[in-house]
Amino acid sequence: MYCENFKLRELPFRLSPDPQFLFLSRAHARAKAYMESTIWFTDGFVVITGEIGAGKTTLIESFLRQLDSDVVIAQINQTQVNAVEFLQTVLVQFGFSPFKMRKAELIATLNSFLIEQYAAGRKVLLIIDEAQNLSLKVLEEIRMLSGIEATKEKVLRIILAGQPELNEKLDSSALVQLSQRVRLRFHLGALSREDLRSYVLHRLDIAGSNGREIFAEDTYPEIVRYSGGIPRLVNTLCDTAMMSACNEDRDLVTLADIASAVGELQWVEFAARSSSINARQGELERTPTGDRPTRTISKVILSTDGKAAGELHLVPGRKVVGRTPDNDLQIDSRFISRHHCQLITGSDGITVVEDLNSTNGIVIRGKRVRRHTLRDRDVITIGQHEMLYVDENTEHLADTHDDLPVIDDAANEESDEEGREDAAGAG
């Protein structure tokens, strides 16, 4: 190939997933943190979606490499199966030979195995890639598995990864119970212009560039233009362009090489392709028009000592609030857990707030709650902060951020005092 021409140890843009080449953009780092949260929490599960080539599989492989030896893993990649075949596949991953078992025996065997692992102090993790292909019946089996518990603690951790169609399935009326079990949900979008350049340089460096310029600076806008920032497409375009430069006996990829690669691949500009990436990402935030039913849009206004300190706009989906930068709304306070709570907004506009096993909890109307359906002007007390929930479709709503109602959290004062001693390391 072209490694010798560019003085590289190995090919930098292979399409096969390789954790060694993983580039953690801010979005990828956040998705990985969500995966890691399955080890911290024992109830619910995590859903990671992204377009084809967004890096989901590479992210999963990197995550798996870093797990401790006390984690027992079942990794499922073949998802076009019925319910019995799915249960058999899971048991095979755990070392069983279940092909002569009836469904009831499959379930009993799996339950016993999970309880045994829990009793032995081991964590069990089920990762399902390409989960958008799962049938509704199989997804219902997964919901049942997620409910298995020992001494009131769930014994199976679950990660579902798939294309955006997975979100559409989970949000369907047939899977309401399953959707409510989802603790965290995140969509991997395209790389930004800055991240794309860093991504290319990162892969070249891993391959042995040692900082040498291999792609001319003016090639990056063209790579963005034709790849759309999708990592797999970036790899394809860069690999083909490097072969073009090599054929011309050059060790620098130029605009001419990008143009040659685009011609060879028969690509048009990414924006003109049939890909629906931008349409899907923008669908939730666009103002509905025509015959499409209007979606209720809402927000929460964060305040500290009665003064507005930030806003978080809510659209159908999930938003996470916590102390670290990977949250949708960051509250940098020692009274706030790493991932403190989540706000789940349905397609009907109804928003539910849910505590994520935080140290100091969430308080609404003077009571500490785990899960609560929000109404316009509800105030969520979180640590020493307040979040005002605003339903922007409510007619009587006045546009004010300063006159925020304050909840008397005396009922939670004792638990907050206890939390102050150790909340600095919460999460």
Image (tube, rainbow, N blue to C red):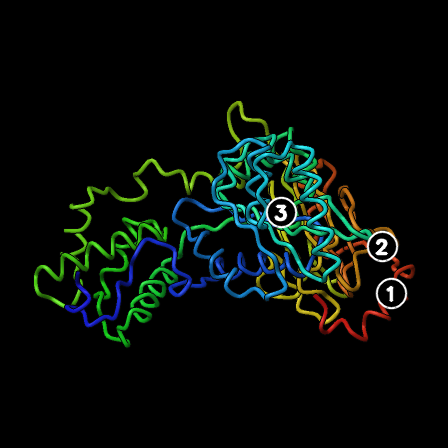
Residue for badge 3: 318
User: What is the secondary structure assignment of the residue under circle 2?
Assistant: strand
Q: Is residue 115 visible?
A: yes
Residue for badge 1: 415
Residue for badge 2: 368
The image position of residue 99, as x and y in percent, is 56, 36
Q: How crowded is mark 3: few (under 14 residues within 10 Å), some or many (20 or more)?
A: many
The answer to whether 313 appears left or right of 395 in the picture is: left
Q: Can residue 281 be seen in this view?
A: no
Taking depth in this image into account, of 92 and 55 the one nearest to the observer is: 92
CA gap, disc 3 to disc 1?
27 Å
Residue type at mark 1? Ser
Residue ID at (61%, 30%): 137
Total numbered circles: 3
Residue type at mark 2? Arg
Q: Verify CB contact (< 8 Å) between mark 2 and mark 1.
A: yes
Residue type at mark 3? Arg
The image position of residue 232, as x and y in percent, is 34, 51
Residue ID at (79%, 56%): 362
User: What is the secondary structure assignment of the residue under circle 1?
Assistant: helix
Residue ID at (45%, 52%): 57
The answer to whether 343 appears left or right of 194 in the picture is: right
